Amino acid sequence: MATFYVPSTNLIGRGVVNEIGSYVKDLGYTKALLVTDKFIESSDIMEKVAAPLKEAGIDYVVYSDVDPNPSVKNVEDGVAVLKENGCDFIISLGGGSPQDAASSISIIATNGGRPQDYEGLHKSQKLGLPVVAINTTAGTSAEITINYVITDEERKVKMVMVDKNSLAVLSVNDPELMLSKPAALTAATGMDALTHAIEALVTPGAYGVTKKLSIGAIELIKEYLPKAVENGHDIEAREAMVNAIFLGGMAFNNAGLGYVHSMAHQLGAVYHLPHGVCCAMLLPVVERENAKRVPAAFRDVAKALGLDPAGKTDEECAAYAIAEIEKLSETVGIPKKLTELDIKEEEFDFEYLSKNALIDACAPGNPFMPTLEETIAFYKELF
């Protein structure tokens, strides 16, 4: 038996943001806490979202203090603004950071407590405050998943929450909101999406439906991510990437992730590095080791990345898959070493990050459980 989580209503395609007003009105909500970041608040994206809301008579108050790695303080400040203004639902607008912050605000608004109380699997007792999730990157797929990540500033740890009560009631994926995203952000978020799809495909938690979704996502990302990075206004490429993150999001939302995400979360928590860049750098490192344990799982990865696996051994398929991951990462301009991001090996706390990776909520989804020493060795490969 398998449980499949996905929002009940999902708007996908060019121009769908113009429809949000009527959908929200039909749901009966009246005043939103609009959770976003400073960049989006000052961009033309805000007006594209505000116009249909105003037309439908939906009131909202903006909370835009979300950091790139959303923190406990961001969440608690957002909850305070929500309560002060009597909001009856939340609109999350942005990439993974506003989406994750909104999920945490939603849970605390109805369950109480602090973000730390919900770290782990399904810790809340009540449905969160309804969330209308409008995505602007392709991407984290946070708008359609039950996963969210909040940084505990005091412990310097990214807390992973997996909570069915945080699922959005409506998701919006409009590629026209993504046309202005810079190449570096497009590349990083796209490689995060590739990581989701590959980890969800090789995890022991994968099953028939999620495998097909993962394969479809990988195929689209391989073909269209380089095009979206090269020309951000290529609407066909942007729309294909929207389809990819929707497929990949459904896959990992129900199959799980793995050790790439476990390790990437620690880099983000301690060094505030972009999550997608961390995933891209770690993906070949971890999957090379996974392939030694479960080479057969990489036949589908290799096929999705362009190889005809007929007559090839499992090991040949795995080697092809790793090489293609590295090639795609290089094509879209992802740094190869942490030194390119001004992280010095002599100042890197290998043991602290590795110990936290071992207890990250994504770790059990990996095909094998690395030791502390193996995790340290993985991080060392990034220098």
Image (tube, grey):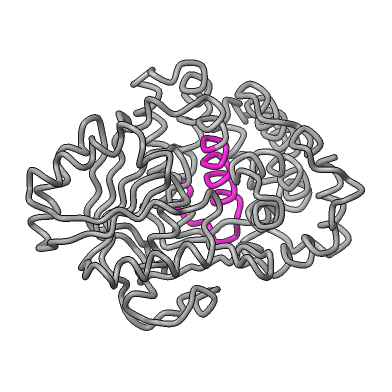
The relative height of residue 76 versus residue 211 in the rendered view (above or below) is: below
The relative height of residue 33 versus residue 281 in the rendered view (above or below) is: below
In the foreground, 315 or 104:
104
Residue 216: image quadrant is top left
Q: Is residue 209 visible?
A: no
Q: Is residue 245 visible?
A: yes
Image x and y of residue 92, in percent? 33, 53
Say which residue appears at 48% left-offset and 18% top-offset: 227
> Horizontally, is 114 left or right of 30 in the view?
right
Report the quarter where the C terminus lies. Answer: top right
The answer to if 260 sits in the magenta stretch is: no
Report the quarter where the N terminus lies. Answer: bottom left
In the foreground, 70 or 359:
70
> Horizontally, is 281 left or right of 19 in the view?
right
**Magenta residues (range):** 189-212
Say which residue appears at 43% left-offset and 21% top-offset: 232
> Horizontally, is 119 left or right of 284 in the view?
left
Image x and y of residue 198, in percent? 58, 44
